[in-house]
C-alpha cells in the first residue's frame, strides 16, 4: 500500500469533524487497528508520514498520557496530486481506482477534470540533448483495445488500431467507389469470379525489417480458416497459392464477384509468418505489421504507437500517438479526443469560434440496434409481443430528450433506409392491445448491453414500463457480452454497428462467429440468410446485391426480430491549428494524416 493511501485511510477513520492541523487524542493501538498492522509497523508509518510533513505526531509519555495526532496535509489536494502522479506515470487505471475508493465524488470536481484536459492533446517532446523535438498526440479513449489480432477483431476501435499496425492487399475508397493498390499493386480475376490473382509490391517491410512476400499472405489467409472468429470471410476459399514471392492466387469454391472487397476487410490484414510461428501467443503482446505505425508499448492502461519511418505509402507526420485507456465509469469527466481537437489549449472562449471547423465522415454512421434472442424461450417468442415492443419505442421522442446533434430515427441498417411512416411507428394504445392479444402475463425481459449503451437501455426500460413490460438491465463488459454462454442468458441485446461498407459489413454481421446477428438468430432463418448471401456474392451488379441484402433486412423487420433505434453521424469539431484532420470509415481519427502548426 502506498504511503498516501495510508494517510487517506487514517484521515477518513480518525479525523472525523476535527479540522485539519488541530490535534486529537489517539493511541498507537487505534492506528494499528485502522491500518490492519502491528504497533511496530504503525510507528514506522507514522514516522514516514511525519517525514513527508503530512502529520504531526506527539507520542504520549508515561501511563495515562495519550498521544496526539494532527493531520497537516489537505486531503483533497493530496488525493489530486497522488492521482496526477499515477497518471503521469501512465497508470491511469490505478489513478481512477484511487479516486473511486477515496474520492467521494472528487472525480467530478473542476480542478481534476481541468488537469485531465491539460494532460491530453498535442505536444512536442524534446529529446535528450535538446537538438530534436518529436510531435506526439495523447488521446483518452473510454474503451479497451480488446485485441489486435485481425482474425478475432469485432469492435470498431480495435479495428481502427489494427489499421495503424497492419496493411491489406488492397484498399477501398468508398467516397470514390473504387479500389486502390496497397500491398498489391495490380490484380486480375476470371470471368466466372472463381479465381483471383494479386501482384505484390517490392520493398514492403514489416516493422522488424523483414520484407513481405506471398508466403506471408498465404499464411495469413490459411490461419483465418482455423477456428478464428472471422473465418466466415474465407468459408468459400478452396486454395490460396504463393505462385512466386510476388504473386498470390486465390481459388474459390463458389463465385464471389466482390472477393476483392473481402480483401479490404480488417480481418484480411497481412501478418509476418516468421514472427507468428516463432513466438506463438506471445507475438500478440506486441504484434508487428507493415502499417504506418509500430507498437512501442501496450498495457491495460495505454497503447503507444510510433511512426514507421519506412512506410511504403509515406511516413506519418506524427512521431507518436499515446492512446490512454480510460475507465468506462470515467466517461462523465467529458475529457474526449473530440474536445481536444476543438480546443487544443483548453480554451473554449467565444473568440475561438472562428477558428473551429467541422469534419465529418461521409461513410461512418453508427446504427443502434436491439436484437431479440430467438433461441431462448420467453414472451418475446410471440410476434404480437415483439410488435408491441416496437410500437412503444418513440424514436423521435428519444432524440428530442437527448438533444444530441447528428441523431436521426433508424428504420434500417443504413441512413437512407427510411421506407416507413415514422409517425405511425409509435402507438402505445395499439401496443397495449397487442400485449393483451398475446396473453402477456408481465414476465420480465432481460436486456444485455455494455456501459456505452446503458443510457439508451434505461430509456427503453422507462418506455416499456409505461405499458407494463418490466425490463431487467444487465450491464456487461465488452469481452463478456460476446461470450456465447452470457449471450444465451439474455432475452435481447442492445448494441450498435458501424457500417462503412454496405455489402461486406452487413455480411459480416450475419456470418461472424459470436456476432449478435448470427448467434441470436434461429437456425432455420440463419440458413436462409446464408443462402441469400451466396446469391449476393454470385450477383454481377451492385444493385442486384443490394436488393438481395435488402430482402434479408425486410424479412427480419417483418418477423420483428430486430428493432432499429437511431443513426448517429460521425463528426468532430477541429481547431484550424490542426491540419490533415480526417475521420476514416470507422469514425475514428486518421492518425497518419494529422499534424499541427
Image (cartoon, helix red, strand yellow):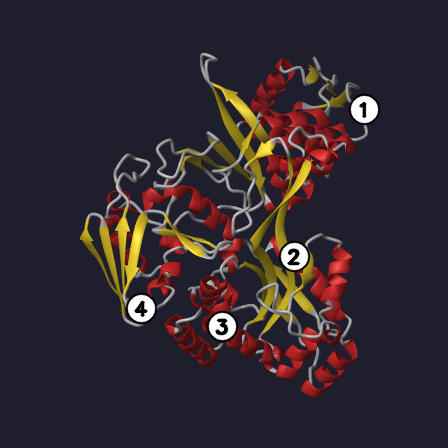
- Label 2 belongs to which residue? 454
- Label 4 belongs to which residue? 193
Q: CA distance from mark 4 to mark 2?
A: 44 Å
- Label 3 belongs to which residue? 549
Mark number displayed over residue 19: 1
The secondary element bearing badge 2 is classed as: helix
The secondary element bearing badge 4 is classed as: loop
Q: Quadrant of residue 129?
A: top left
Mark 4 or 1: the one toward you = 4
Mark 2: give few (<14), some (14-19) or many (20+) Cα within 10 Å. some
Mark 2 or 3: the one toward you = 3
Q: Can you see residue 579?
A: yes
Earlier in the chain: of badge 1 and badge 2, it is 1
* Image location (x, y in percent) of residue 195: 26, 65
Q: Is residue 250 above or below residue 554?
A: above
Q: Relative to the observer, which residue lies in front, 554 or 440?
A: 554
Q: CA distance from mark 1 to mark 2?
A: 41 Å
Q: Relative to the observer, which residue lies in front, 324 or 542?
A: 542
Q: Residue at x 59, y 57 (%)?
A: 366
Amino acid at each position: 500500500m502506498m504511503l498516501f493511501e495510508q494517510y487517506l485511510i487514517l484521515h477518513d477513520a480518525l479525523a472525523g469533524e476535527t479540522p485539519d492541523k488541530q490535534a486529537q487524542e489517539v493511541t498507537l493501538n487505534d492506528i494499528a487497528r485502522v491500518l490492519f498492522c502491528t504497533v511496530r509497523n504503525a510507528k514506522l508509518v507514522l514516522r514516514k508520514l511525519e517525514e513527508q510533513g503530512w502529520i504531526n505526531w506527539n507520542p504520549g509519555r508515561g501511563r495515562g498520557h495519550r498521544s496526539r495526532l494532527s493531520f497537516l496535509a489537505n486531503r483533497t489536494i493530496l488525493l489530486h496530486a497522488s492521482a496526477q502522479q499515477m497518471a503521469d506515470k501512465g497508470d491511469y487505471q490505478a489513478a481512477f481506482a484511487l479516486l473511486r475508493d477515496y474520492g467521494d465524488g472528487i472525480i467530478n470536481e473542476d480542478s481534476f477534470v481541468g488537469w485531465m484536459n491539460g494532460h491530453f492533446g498535442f505536444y512536442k517532446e524534446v529529446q535528450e540533448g535538446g537538438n530534436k523535438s518529436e510531435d506526439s498526440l495523447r488521446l483518452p479513449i473510454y474503451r479497451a483495445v480488446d485485441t489486435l489480432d485481425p482474425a478475432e477483431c469485432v469492435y470498431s476501435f480495435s479495428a481502427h488500431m489494427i489499421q495503424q499496425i497492419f496493411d491489406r492487399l488492397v484498399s477501398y475508397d468508398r467516397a470514390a467507389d473504387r479500389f486502390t493498390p496497397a500491398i498489391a499493386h495490380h490484380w486480375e480475376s476470371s470471368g466466372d469470379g472463381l479465381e483471383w490473382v494479386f501482384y505484390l509490391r517490392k520493398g514492403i517491410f514489416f516493422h522488424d525489417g523483414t520484407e513481405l512476400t506471398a508466403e506471408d499472405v498465404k499464411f495469413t489467409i490459411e490461419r483465418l480458416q482455423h477456428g478464428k472468429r472471422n473465418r466466415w470471410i474465407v468459408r468459400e476459399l478452396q486454395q490460396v497459392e504463393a505462385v512466386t514471392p510476388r504473386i498470390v492466387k486465390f481459388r474459390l469454391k463458389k463465385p464471389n464477384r466482390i472477393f476483392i472487397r473481402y480483401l479490404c476487410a480488417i480481418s484480411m490484414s497481412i501478418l509476418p509468418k516468421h514472427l507468428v510461428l516463432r513466438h506463438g501467443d506471445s507475438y500478440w503482446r506486441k504484434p508487428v505489421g507493415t502499417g504506418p505505425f509500430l507498437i512501442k508499448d501496450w498495457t491495460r492502461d495505454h497503447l503507444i504507437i510510433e511512426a514507421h519511418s519506412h512506410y511504403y505509402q509515406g511516413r506519418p507526420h506524427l512521431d507518436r500517438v499515446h492512446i490512454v485507456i480510460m475507465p468506462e465509469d470515467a466517461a462523465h469527466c467529458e475529457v474526449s479526443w473530440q474536445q481536444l481537437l476543438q480546443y487544443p489549449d483548453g480554451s473554449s472562449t467565444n473568440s475561438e469560434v472562428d477558428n473551429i471547423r467541422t469534419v465529418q465522415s461521409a461513410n461512418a454512421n453508427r446504427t443502434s440496434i436491439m436484437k431479440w434472442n430467438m433461441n431462448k424461450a420467453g414472451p418475446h417468442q410471440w410476434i404480437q409481443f415483439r410488435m408491441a415492443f416496437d410500437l412503444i419505442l418513440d424514436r423521435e421522442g428519444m432524440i428530442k430528450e437527448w438533444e444530441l446533434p447528428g441523431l436521426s430515427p433508424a428504420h434500417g441498417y443504413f441512413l437512407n433506409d427510411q421506407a416507413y411512416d415514422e409517425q405511425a411507428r409509435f402507438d402505445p394504445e395499439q401496443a397495449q392491445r397487442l400485449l393483451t392479444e398475446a396473453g402477456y402475463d408481465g414476465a420480465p425481459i432481460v436486456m444485455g448491453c455494455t456501459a456505452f449503451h446503458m443510457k439508451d437501455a434505461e430509456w427503453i426500460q422507462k418506455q416499456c414500463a409505461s405499458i407494463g413490460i418490466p425490463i431487467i438491465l444487465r450491464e456487461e463488459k465488452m469481452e463478456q457480452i460476446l461470450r456465447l454462454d452470457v449471450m444465451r442468458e439474455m432475452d435481447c441485446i442492445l448494441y450498435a454497428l458501424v457500417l462503412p461498407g454496405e455489402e461486406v459489413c452487413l455480411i459480416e454481421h450475419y456470418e461472424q462467429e459470436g456476432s449478435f446477428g448470427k448467434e441470436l438468430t434461429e437456425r432455420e432463418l440463419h440458413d436462409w440468410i446464408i443462402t441469400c448471401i451466396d446469391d449476393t456474392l454470385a450477383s454481377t451488379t451492385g444493385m442486384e446485391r443490394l436488393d438481395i441484402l435488402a430482402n434479408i433486412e425486410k424479412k427480419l423487420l417483418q418477423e420483428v426480430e430486430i428493432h432499429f433505434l437511431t443513426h448517429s453521424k460521425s463528426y468532430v469539431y477541429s481547431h484550424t491549428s490542426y491540419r490533415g484532420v480526417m475521420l476514416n470509415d470507422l469514425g475514428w481519427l486518421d492518425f497518419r494524416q494529422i499534424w499541427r502548426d
